[in-house]
Image (cartoon, grey):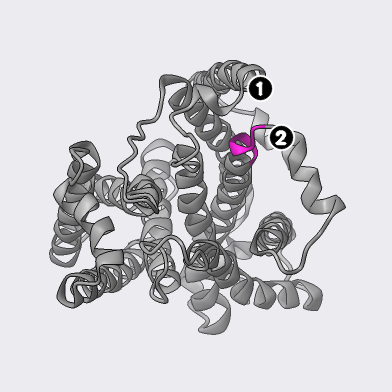
Amino acid sequence: MVEKAFQGGKNYWMWLLFLFLLTIYGFIFYSKQLIYGLGITGMGRDVSWGLYIANFTFFVGVAASAVMLVIPYYLHRVKEYSETLVFAEFLAVASVFLAILFVFVDLGKPERVFNVLIYPSPNSLLFWDMVVLSGYLLLNVILGWKGLDLAKKGIDSPRWLKILIYTSIPWAISIHTVTAFIYCGLLSRPFWFSSLLAPRFLASAFTSGPSILLALCLVLNRLTGFDPGLRVLENLKKTVTYALSIHIFFLVAEFFTTFYSGSPEHLRHFEYLLLGSGGHYWLTALSWFSLIASIFSFLTLISTGFSKNRVLIFVTLLILIFAIWVEKGLTLIVTGFNPTVDLRIVRYVPTFEEISITLGVWSLGALILTLLFKIAISIKRSLPPQISLSERK
């Protein structure tokens, strides 16, 4: 099936070339980082996590969201999802790969990653994060690839594959839960020290992941003619809407608890984030944009159907994806470090080199996703109607 990825028209090859060149561009700046260290980034002693870890957190959530199709299809027999399930699994593969790669580039010396393997520490949440991420990556590679192979042959899933499928459901929840525990387990960082952080992570993950999948389905429909069906699109939109409503509720609960209680340890961080204390208004602007965009997206999604305006929904999804990336990305990371333990405000702005490396990592993930989606589309087109995924038992 691999050969399907290298069969396409001029536009397809131009897109692959663009992503490849952008990846090389990012690698050039990463080579500079290997020589000069993380000093070329905006990070420092006080703000030691930045754009890289922000993307890591976001893409772990996108990867976990594949469970929102796995559960309805395998546990509730929603057969309409059969045409879309493999795309969700391949999206999870690319997202986990991106998450791991962002951790890799965040290390000043990449060989340090082997310390986790050579000196494993079960008491470390970072160790368990490595375990769940690598395991989830392997699970989705097997499930997606084997699922396509079974569809091509027109046979049902063997028992061992079904065991892996059911295993992937709690595993998907675990990867983002462990990520949240890395943050909320830090007592010295009051902004993250909240028992609501893990549920917030999952709610935002189940918003952003299906939003990306839904937007990609619309793009695939426009470029390749792939049509998952109106019912699938509407169900995915409902999933995004419900998850978004929970995400907004959790944010409101967090704001109320902080401002009504007046706890100074938490209040300082929210004043920095929402009111721009210390004069760092660029982060405040992003934070308010994220909040307003989330509310706007919720109102748009509940009032607009695909049969009415697909363009509006597509634009809304793009706005929502960026809003979630901001909320659980830069604003989450930078605000956790500001004010510092000695109540100083430390400025952090991603540097040009840092942004270039990030673009390179994104493009590599997009390249992998493009190849996987090309294989899936090609296989689906080659299936005769009698053994299509929607008719398999």
Q: Are marks 1 and 2 in contact (CB under 8 Å)?
A: yes
Q: Badge 1 is on which residue?
A: 34
- Of all residues, the one furthest to the right in this rendering is 118
Q: How far across and down, in percent of the image, does residue 109 sit?
A: 70, 32
Q: How far across and down, in percent of the image, does residue 126 sit?
A: 66, 58
Q: Amino acid at mark 2?
A: Pro
- Mark 2 or mark 1, which is nearer the start of the sequence? 1
Mark 1 residue element = helix
Q: How far across and down, in percent of the image, does residue 68 sit?
A: 47, 70
Q: Nearer the viewer, residue 45 or 6?
A: 45
Q: Which residues are magenta?
A: 104-108
**Mark 1 neighbour class, 10 Å CA radius: few under 14, some 14 to 19, many 20 or more:** some
**Mark 2 neighbour class, 10 Å CA radius: few under 14, some 14 to 19, many 20 or more:** few
Residue at image location 38% in from the left, 64% down from the top: 190
To which quarter of the image does residue 4 belong? top right
**In this image, 95 relative to 149: left or right?**
left
Q: Quadrant of the N terminus?
A: top right
Q: Badge 2 is on which residue?
A: 110
